[in-house]
């Protein structure tokens, strides 16, 4: 029991440092704290175990998550014409090659990727979330809408071309405010 | 490359520490701990002797710990308020 | 088994401490540095709790613990509760400073932040 939780905590510490995604690192740190609290309990220190479980595992995880939320998040809205009719298919997260590329891009730009499935068009999204992008997929062609003042849009275009995403299958549309 | 260098250096230092710490001879019996264990209940009335150390024998420590927590909360509130004011401009 | 005898609180605490030092040295992300500080702090607490630990001891709780032959040491336990609370203060303050820094310089990388500071100064 003691040996197992000690080795588990070492594994969690290594994972928390080695993983690239910040949210996963925070969750690994939470698991690390929890297993450390079990170790303290097995070392005959129930008071310290209680304090660690409440403070180290719960409150500090909440603090990290709040800080991560304040930290920049890259938001992509995703609208697919093909699946619009079948509602239940929104729930399943499909890892298309484009989404894998976007994950790579956000890791390179030190941002956390967040993908939201939506039915709205770009004007409504831009009103609420000025820094977000919209991916629109229709008949095998992808359109990426974004605001031209967003400095990420050129970087995204360069990245997609450099990674060998077929040039003919996507268009980047820069929508000005005045057009709306 | 740089990470591998750092990792191997720290690994060597850690192995040195581990084998050095293994060679420390066992020290004297725990006189202070035995004193607290024998007398804590009669001196403070608390059945938990960790509590009696925390709140009776070492209460200055607890007091300054609370002060540290208080000042850190003050710091967090000050910085957050400053940031929010920037956002509103 | 030699491996079983080697895995105890003291050796694991040294290993965890050096994992934390590696995280501070090798990772350039500020949030990773804060996580590493948390890991180092947990390692130090584990060291203080497990040094001279006796598997046959009882926790130092109860009115009649003076009757037991082997009782865990209450002093490091009380001080480690203090250390946990101080650690959460350090984490909260450094996370707030990190959010401010990210707001100001737009990066969470030590080197990029340093470069931007040099450009501004």
Image (cartoon, coloured by chain):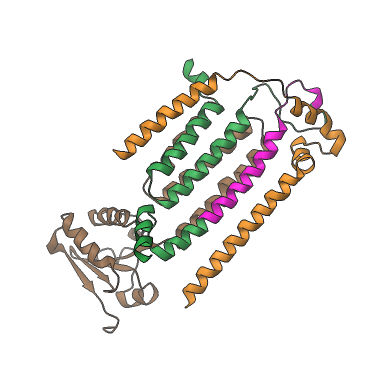
Chain colours: A brown, B orange, C green
Q: Quadrant of the C terminus of chain A?
A: bottom left
Identified at 65% across, 53% down, the residue is B68
Q: Nearer the viewer, residue B48 or B7?
A: B7
Q: Residue furthest right?
A: B42
| Residue span colored magenta | C66-94
User: Is residue A120 highlighted in magenta?
Assistant: no
**What type of secondary structure mainly makes up the magenta span?**
helix
- State whether residue A34 is above or below residue C12: below
Q: Is residue B33 left or right of residue C117?
A: right
Quadrant of the image containing the N terminus of chain A: top right
Q: Residue B59, percent across and down?
A: 76, 45
Q: Is residue A153 above or below residue A45?
A: below
**Where's residue A90, x and y in %?**
34, 60
**Residue C85 is a magenta residue:** yes
User: Quadrant of the rendered structure where residue B1 is?
Assistant: top left
**Residue visible at 34% across and 63% down in the picture:** C119
Q: Is residue A80 left or right of residue C71?
A: left
Q: Nearer the viewer, residue C37 or A136?
A: C37
Residue at image x 46%, y 39%? C20
* Residue B72, percent from left and from top: 61, 56
Quadrant assignment, res A118? bottom left
**Total labels drawn:** 0
Which residue is at the front of the view, A101 or B83? B83
């Amino acid at each position: 029991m003691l040996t197992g939780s000690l080795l588990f905590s070492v594994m969690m510490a290594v994972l928390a440092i080695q993983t690239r995604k910040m949210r996963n690192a925070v969750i690994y740190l939470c698991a690390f704290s929890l297993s450390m609290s079990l170790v303290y309990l097995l070392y005959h220190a129930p008071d310290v175990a209680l304090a660690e479980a409440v403070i180290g595992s719960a409150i500090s995880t909440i603090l990290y998550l709040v800080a991560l939320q304040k930290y920049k998040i890259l938001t992509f809205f995703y609208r697919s014409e093909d699946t619009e009719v079948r509602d239940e298919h929104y729930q399943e997260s499909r890892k298309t090659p484009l989404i894998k590329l976007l994950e790579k891009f956000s890791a390179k730009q030190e941002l956390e990727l967040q993908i939201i499935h939506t039915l709205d068009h770009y004007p409504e999204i831009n009103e609420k979330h000025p820094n977000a992008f919209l991916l629109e997929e229709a008949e095998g062609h992808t359109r990426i809408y974004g605001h031209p003042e967003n400095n990420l849009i050129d970087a995204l275009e360069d990245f997609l071309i450099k990674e060998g995403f077929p040039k003919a299958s996507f268009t980047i549309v820069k929508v000005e405010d005045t057009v709306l | 490359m740089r990470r591998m260098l750092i990792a191997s250096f720290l690994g060597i230092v850690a192995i040195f520490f581990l084998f050095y710490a293994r060679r420390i001879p066992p020290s004297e019996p725990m006189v202070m701990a035995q004193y607290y264990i024998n007398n804590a209940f009669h001196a403070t009335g608390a059945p938990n002797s960790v509590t009696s150390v925390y709140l009776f024998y070492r209460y200055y420590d607890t007091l300054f710990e609370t002060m540290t927590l208080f000042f850190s909360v003050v710091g967090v509130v000050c910085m957050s308020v400053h940031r929010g004011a920037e956002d509103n401009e | 088994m030699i491996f079983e005898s080697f895995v105890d609180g003291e050796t694991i605490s040294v290993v965890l401490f050096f994992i934390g030092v590696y995280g501070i040295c090798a990772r350039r992300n500020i949030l990773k540095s804060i996580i590493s500080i948390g890991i180092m702090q947990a390692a130090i607490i584990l060291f203080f709790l497990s040094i001279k630990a006796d598997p046959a001891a009882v926790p130092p709780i109860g009115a009649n613990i003076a009757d037991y032959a082997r009782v865990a040491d209450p002093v490091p336990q009380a001080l480690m509760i203090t250390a946990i609370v101080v650690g959460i203060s350090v984490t909260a303050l450094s996370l707030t400073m990190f959010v401010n820094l990210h707001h100001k310089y737009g990066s969470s990388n030590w080197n990029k932040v340093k470069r931007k500071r040099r450009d501004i100064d």
